[in-house]
């Protein structure tokens, strides 16, 4: 959880709205909320857990760290239905879906939410039937699976918010280790939801699609972040090296279009060996387009270049003699 809490603390130092009330909805030991108070200066936090052992431990940890908080023992769904907060953090063991409907049904306009999903194998396509049951969406197991999963999670939140005439606005969203994480605000709806279905073609190209048995989605196709907000963030002395690296990568790719390509997929399509990643990135930039590494995949590239340009540049930079001469895969 180090990276997760690193990013949380960095985000809260510059949260776009003043937070007077914050709920750590599934608090366990209280470590998340205590760190947010000590590092990010959040106001007194409400800590909820249904376990007597957990709530006793939270009180002891508050005492040891000399911070104050309102410790509540109860069912989170009941609490969300009864009390409204400026920010609610939900970080469960497993899917967040049981808590998202009551959260978004009762959320104040302008309030914030932080949601962690650890059912990444479901969201990323390993168990599509479970994803359909939990999120009413179709995933795909592929290199872009984590980004698809994050867009399914955001799309699910957006659909729940829409039932109340609201919309979500992602502030920062990412995948790391075994979890997906998003920070967003709940605002009044002013336009259509940026939800859509897509298909994946050979080489990792994604195109718009109508709903059918082969589509992926519905997906959130809007920005994953508020790019200007994200670029204003800086690591603190508490931030781990891994957290700082993740933040830096997120900032570079923040406002590039949805989905990325991997040199693995492109090499498989072209039946050859890939160029070095930095060579490929520089060659794309030489065409006048932007290109950056993505945090979703170690050999992933996010770019605003059309897919035809991506293929052309990739072919030009493939090592000489690396193809098998049979042309691109179908």
Image (cartoon, rainbow, N blue to C red):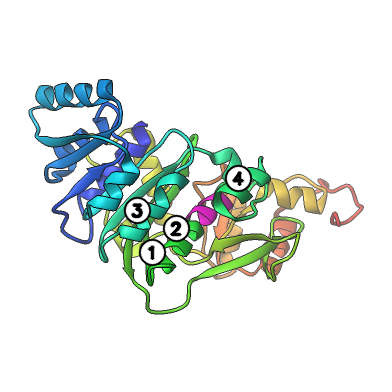
Spatial CA span between label 2 and label 3: 10 Å
Say which residue label 3 marks: 103
Task: Determine contact: label 1, label 3, CB under 8 Å.
Answer: no
Q: Relative to residue 24, is residue 229 depicted above or below? A: below
Say which residue label 1 marks: 168
Residue 23: x and y in percent read 23, 44
Return the disc, 1 or 3, that comes first in the chain's sequence.
3
Magenta residues (range): 147-153
Return the disc, 2 or 1, that comes first in the chain's sequence.
2
Residue at the image position 55 percent from the left and 67 percent from the top: 304
Residue at the image position 70 percent from the left and 54 percent from the top: 317
Judge by depth and name the residue closer to the eye, 250 or 110. 110
SS for dot 1 = strand
Q: Main secondary structure of the magenta part?
A: helix
Return the disc, 2 or 3, that comes first in the chain's sequence.
3
Say which residue label 4 marks: 124
Mark number displayed over residue 157: 2
Residue at the image position 75 percent from the left and 58 percent from the top: 315
Image quadrant where residue 241 sits: top left
Could one spot residue 138 in this view of the protein? Answer: yes
Viewer-nearest of discs 4 and 2: 2
Badge 4 local density, few (<14 within 10 Å), some, or many (20+)?
many
**Where's the N terminus, which quadrant?**
top left
Judge by depth and name the residue closer to the eye, 201 or 139. 139
SS for dot 3 = helix
Outermost residue, bottom side: 191
């Amino acid at each position: 959880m180090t990276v997760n809490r690193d990013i949380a603390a960095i985000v809260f130092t510059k949260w776009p709205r003043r937070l007077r009330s914050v709920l750590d909805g599934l608090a366990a030991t209280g470590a998340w909320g205590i760190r947010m108070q000590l590092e990010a200066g959040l106001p007194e936090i409400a800590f909820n857990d249904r376990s007597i052992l957990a709530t006793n431990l939270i009180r002891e940890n508050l005492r040891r760290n000399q911070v104050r908080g309102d410790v509540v023992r109860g069912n989170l769904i009941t609490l969300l239905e009864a009390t409204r907060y400026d920010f609610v953090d939900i970080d469960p063991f497993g899917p967040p879906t049981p808590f998202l409907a009551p959260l978004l049904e009762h959320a104040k306009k302008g309030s914030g939410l932080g949601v962690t999903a650890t059912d990444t194998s479901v969201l990323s396509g390993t168990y599509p039937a479970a994803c359909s049951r939990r999120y009413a969406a179709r995933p795909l197991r592929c290199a872009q699976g984590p980004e698809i999963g994050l867009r399914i999670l955001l799309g699910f939140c957006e659909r729940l918010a829409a039932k109340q005439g609201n919309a979500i606005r992602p502030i920062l969203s990412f995948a790391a280790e075994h979890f997906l994480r998003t920070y967003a605000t709940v605002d009044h709806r002013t336009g259509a939801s940026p939800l859509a279905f897509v298909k994946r073609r050979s080489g990792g190209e994604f195109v718009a699609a109508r709903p059918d048995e082969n589509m992926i989605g519905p997906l959130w196709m809007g920005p994953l972040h508020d790019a200007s907000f994200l670029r204003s963030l800086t690591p603190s002395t508490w931030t781990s090296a891994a957290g700082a690296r993740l933040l830096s990568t997120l900032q570079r790719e923040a406002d590039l279009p949805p989905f990325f390509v991997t040199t693995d997929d492109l090499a498989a399509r072209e039946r050859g060996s890939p160029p070095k990643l930095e060579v490929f990135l520089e060659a794309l930039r030489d065409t006048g387009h932007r290109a950056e590494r993505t945090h979703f995949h170690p050999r992933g590239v996010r770019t605003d270049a059309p897919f035809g340009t991506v293929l052309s540049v990739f072919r030009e930079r493939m090592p000489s003699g690396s193809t098998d001469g049979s042309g691109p895969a179908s």
